[in-house]
């Protein structure tokens, strides 16, 4: 038990009984949720953790074969849920963690109460004319090559693109620092399985009710991606945010909190009416 919790630097807060699990995005850690989490601690049991290779996770727990696909990270998260004996948790995942949570729900149908996916993408590379992911294959290959050549250069390149919101330079600086603090070997592999993955065919099998929060002017996961996911996931709600960029939980926390709470309240109300 303690090994798994220390492995992923798990932290549990909150006074409520309903579990809610927050999963951070690529190159980040659980601290990125600090503007959002306090709004849920009164009524929920909040679970935070760091993916292997990020934050204060145990780097010795990294296994190449296991973590060479997103399902390995999904297994890590399910192990955390099992150790904590969480019942019907709500999952909130940013960016690639949205897909990790989605894969976890496919691995264990009916386990999660809701999936809240913030700026998710099942495929970052364009597959024209039917799918717009935002990047060409060569764009991703150049990014991966840059990561191997210079650990700080890629962070300087990607951080402002991901964060957007140039009027909040302190957030871009924080994201840049987080990228640089990630383990170089693990983050390179994580980048490859994130940006080269294609989980479009899995979306139709998701049975967990899902909220897709889509930001405006998101150059990592453009509008077409969110609309595509909504079309493919059966029980999904699509919400276009006023927030811009790829990290609304940092740049626009108030709107993020409001929309999550609104969705959860609506879901509870509809469940009570149908029961």
Image (spheres, helix red, strand yellow):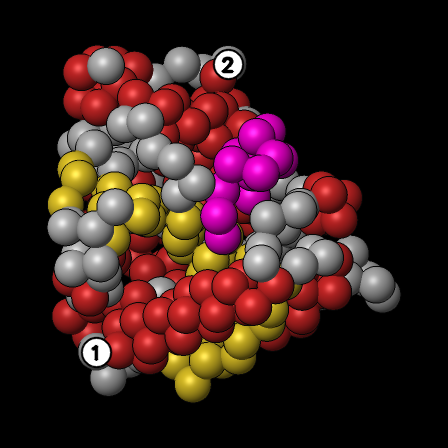
In the displayed structure image, the side of residue 47 where residue 242 appears, left or right: right
Crowding at dot 2, Cα within 10 Å, few <14 / some 14-19 / many 20+, comes out as: few
- Do the numbered discs 1 and 2 sit on residues whose CB atoms are within 8 Å? no
In magenta segment, residue 109: yes
Mark 2 — residue? Answer: 65
Residue 62 can be seen, yes or no = yes
Answer above or below: position of 273 versus 207.
Answer: below
Residue at the image point whose x is 22% and y is 58% from the top: 43
- Check the picture and name the quadrant holding the N terminus: top left
- Tell me residue 209's x, y (percent): 58, 55
Residue 171: x and y, percent? 21, 67
From this viewpoint, is residue 34 visible?
A: no
Considering the numbered disc 2 on the image, is that residue within a helix, a strand or a loop?
A: loop
Q: Is residue 181 above or below residue 153?
A: above
Q: Which residue is mark 1?
A: 168
The segment highlighted magenta reads 102-114
- What is the x, y in percent for residue 259? 40, 75
- Out of 217 and 241, give the one closest to the viewer: 241
- Identify which residue is drawn at 26% across, 36% down: 50
Instruction: Tell me the element at label 1.
Output: loop
Label of residue 74 in the image: none
Q: Judge from the rendering whether residue 128 lies leftward or rightward of residue 55; answer left or right.
A: right
Determine which quarter of the picture holds residue 181.
Answer: top left
Quarter of image, res 41: bottom left
Q: Residue at x 34, y 33 (%)?
A: 86
Q: Quadrant of the C terminus?
A: bottom right
* Crowdedness near tag 1: few (<14), some (14–19) or many (≥20) residues, C-alpha within 10 Å: few
**Does the stretch in magenta take in 50?**
no
Marks 1 and 2 sit apart, C-alpha to C-alpha, by: 39 Å
First in sequence: mark 1 vs mark 2: 2
């Amino acid at each position: 038990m303690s090994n798994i919790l220390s492995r992923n630097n798990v932290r549990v807060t909150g006074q409520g009984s309903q579990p809610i699990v927050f999963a951070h995005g690529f190159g980040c850690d659980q601290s990125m949720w600090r503007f959002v989490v306090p709004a849920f601690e009164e009524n929920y049991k909040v679970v935070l953790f760091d993916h292997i290779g990020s934050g204060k996770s145990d780097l010795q727990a990294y296994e190449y074969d296991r973590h060479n696909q997103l399902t390995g990270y999904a297994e890590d998260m399910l192990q955390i849920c099992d150790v904590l004996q969480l019942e019907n948790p709500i999952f909130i995942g940013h960016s690639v963690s949205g897909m990790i949570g989605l894969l976890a729900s496919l691995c264990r149908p009916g386990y999660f109460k809701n999936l809240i996916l913030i700026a998710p993408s099942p495929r970052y590379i364009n597959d024209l004319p039917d799918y717009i992911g935002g990047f060409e294959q060569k764009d991703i290959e150049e990014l991966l090559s840059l990561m191997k050549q210079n650990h700080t250069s890629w962070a300087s390149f990607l951080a402002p693109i991901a964060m957007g919101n140039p009027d909040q330079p302190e957030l871009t600086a924080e994201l840049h620092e987080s990228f640089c603090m990630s383990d170089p070997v693990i983050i390179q592999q994580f980048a490859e399985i994130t940006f080269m993955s294609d989980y479009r065919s899995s979306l139709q099998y998701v049975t967990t009710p899902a909220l897709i929060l889509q930001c405006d002017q998101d150059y990592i996961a453009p509008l077409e991606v969110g609309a595509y996911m909504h079309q493919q996931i059966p029980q999904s709600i699509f919400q276009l945010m006023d927030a811009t960029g790829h990290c609304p939980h940092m740049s626009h926390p108030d709107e993020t909190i409001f929309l999550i709470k609104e969705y959860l309240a609506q879901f509870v109300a509809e469940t009570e009416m149908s029961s």
